[in-house]
Amino acid sequence: MKMTPAMKKAQENMAPGIIIAEGFLGEENKSIKDMMVRDESEMSKAGLTFDKVGERLSYLMEEGRKGLGEPVTVDKKWLVRVIDPRGKLPCPFEDGIFRKLSAEIELKSSGEKILVTDLSIHLLKQHHFIEGEGSRFRMEPEIIKRVLFA
Amino acid sequence: MVPDINPVVLLFASVFTSNILLANFLGMCSFISISKDMKSANGLGLAVTVVLTLTAMLNWVILQYVLIPLDLLYLRYIIFIIVIAATVQILEMVIDRVSPALYISLGIFLPLITVNCAILGVALFMQIRNYSFIQTVVFAFGSGLGWWLAIMALAAIQKKLVKAPVPAGLSGPGITLITIGFMAMAFIGFSGMLNVQ
Amino acid sequence: MDYLTAPIVVAIIAGVLAAAISIVDKIVNNYGEVNISINKGKKILTLNGGDTLLSSLASKEIFIPSACGGRGSCGACKCQVISDVGAYLPTEIPYLDKEEMGKNIRLSCQVKVKSDIDILIPEDLFNVKKFNSRVISIRDVTHDIKELVFDLQGEEITFQAGRYVQLVVPPYDKIKGTTQRAYSMSSKPGDKNVIEVLIRLVPGGIATTWVHTHLKEGMEVELIGPFGDFERSETDAAMVCVAGGSGMAPFKSILYDMFENGDIDREVWYFFGARTTKDVLYLKEMMDLDAKWENFHFIPALSEPEEGSGWTGETGMITDVLDNYLKTKIDTDKAREGYLCGSPGMIAACNKVMTANNIPLDKIYYDNFA
């Protein structure tokens, strides 16, 4: 599929060792456009919208930060631990710089966890990109649904 | 036959009328790339002058006492290059020991000179034109000064050019080459005053 | 035999030039043996001159911090030179201000050691070493914090309580390069043959994941240190310490160091924040210390204690507990100093509480590493 120069640049930035050692693409060799089209349909299959997911993640991140590095129970449902390993990362789409804030969100009833970062929330909200399969920070639509909208 | 040219005339001729850079267009690469600011240009000009004079002398000796007697003139390119490279290497070490400040200010320019074609050009000219030792020294020194003069002039012009924006398509090397062309035309005005070829 | 003339001539000329270069090299670059005298003769290194000060010192195992590795592009390797080593080089000037030049501070990666030289360096750098250590114990102190003890295999480390070491993580799995991470030492300065650190698992973290899943007892690990400037002040002001999670490490070191060296007249308050009883490490040890040491008060606070755990201590956010104690329990007439170890968010929040309770910002000490 045809990609704009900006997308090609983003794809290059996502390769391992450019912005982060492992890259954003996981095990996939596809173009990010193909990945985004596929993930878009997976999201809608799961009955989710990027806006809704992004909003909830931002809310949990904000609440989690109040724990000052210790886990916090949010709305009696989730256990959120926000870690600030210092440092900042640029977005591969080159539209901003984000703190390396990462949050581990655990649904208390099932124990299932997801791992998000300031940057991965931005990628989801602004670019509808949830990272390649096999990436540490991929947000699998099915899992997101189970953890965030149980 | 050694041509009959007064060394003083030869000195002026090599600086102005047959400027190695603007008349023969030798040593262009470093000339274009290092002419952005006066200070670097000055350092490079000095280095070129010194290396040019030294290597021309050495090469003259080797040419007259080794290559010509043994009928090995066809080896001159490789021999001249080796001599230039070795001289630059030795000079670099000596300057580092004697004057670290000069060494630092010359920085990368010194090794860069090894591949400056003006240096090889001068060595070949002195062979083609059958210069005597004195003539060779004067010619080499003059060529160095001429190169130094030209690069300082270009650096000065480039400094002014900052305030005179050029169309985007011409900026950078484009306008630099045009500038050099104008300079070369100006220097052509000197030609005919002295003839050393 | 004519065809041999040309190669022979080229060979001879090249040989003569090569010989000339190596002769000049021998004469010009031979500075003989020179002495580097550090901190007015406290240590004298004898080595062959000609190399830069930075690499000369590194060859004798004194590591001046340098981020660029001696390329003159970071300006970190500053070092005060007392003897004359010539004028400032153009490559140094951009990294030095007037005040530094007045003190003859130089960039050690640019200055060459050509004759005897006198330099001053922070005393601590003497002690910075690279240790080839062996892991002798890995223990879970909470569900996500491990206590690691490294044996220095005959070497010794000298440090002030509160310092950190850099742990060198080798490439593993998908991670291609080596990684370095800083961890505060929780061992006492008195134990010179071992280093103990506390490492909490950071989900997705490169170094902590390696430590928690790949590192095993008996493996060899490279440690570099000590570094840092976190330490207790030499005043008799009351120390108000706040930590959470693996931020315990420097305080464990400092507190035991004070207690064992008889430095027990000073009042010390130690607030430790955690979520549940599962997250409090060394609870028993700290309680014991509290009981044995009259002026030491250990205040663990749980933000979400489990029901039925029988927790009788403080509850709530550590910042609220701290605020309460600063207002009511800790003598407000006496001088107080803050000591923090934790995430930037935690440090910012504690700074706010402490300054609101009249502890000036310059009396609050913290280390950004946990």
Image (cartoon, rainbow, N blue to C red):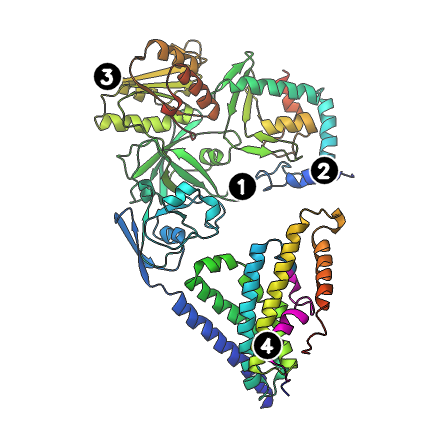
Which corner quadrant of the image does residue B41 belong to?
bottom right
> Which amino acid type is marked by label 2?
Ala
Sooner in the amino-acid sequence: mark 3 or mark 1: 1
Spatial distance from mark 2 to mark 4, Cα to Cα? 63 Å
Local secondary structure at mark 3: loop
Q: Is residue B29 magenta?
A: yes
Q: Residue furthest left?
A: C262
**Against C4, is B174 above or below?**
above
Q: Label 1 is found on which chain of the structure?
A: C
Spatial distance from mark 3 to mark 4, Cα to Cα? 96 Å
Q: Quadrant of the N terminus of chain B?
A: bottom right
Give how far across and how far down residue C187 sits, in percent: 32, 32
Dot 3 and dot 4 within a common chain: no
Q: Nearer the viewer, residue B100 or C268?
A: B100
Spatial distance from mark 4 to mark 1, Cα to Cα? 69 Å
Q: Nearer the viewer, residue A91 or B126?
A: B126
Q: Residue furthest front?
A: B193
Q: Can the viewer see residue C64?
A: no
**Against A66, is B34 above or below?**
below
Whether tag 3 and tag 1 are in contact, CB under 8 A, the answer is no
Local secondary structure at mark 2: helix
> Which amino acid type is marked by label 1?
Ile
State the residue position of label 2.
Answer: A6
Spatial distance from mark 2 to mark 1, Cα to Cα? 27 Å
State the residue position of label 1.
Answer: C175
> On the rendered structure, is A20 left or right of C264?
right
Please tell me whether mark 2 or mark 1 is closer to you in this view.
Answer: 2
Decide: few, some or many residues near mark 2? Use Cα within 10 Å; few <14, some 14-19, many ≥20: few
**Residue stretch in magenta:** B4-31
Spatial distance from mark 3 to mark 1, Cα to Cα? 49 Å
Decide: few, some or many residues near mark 1? Use Cα within 10 Å; few <14, some 14-19, many ≥20: some
State the residue position of label 4.
Answer: B8
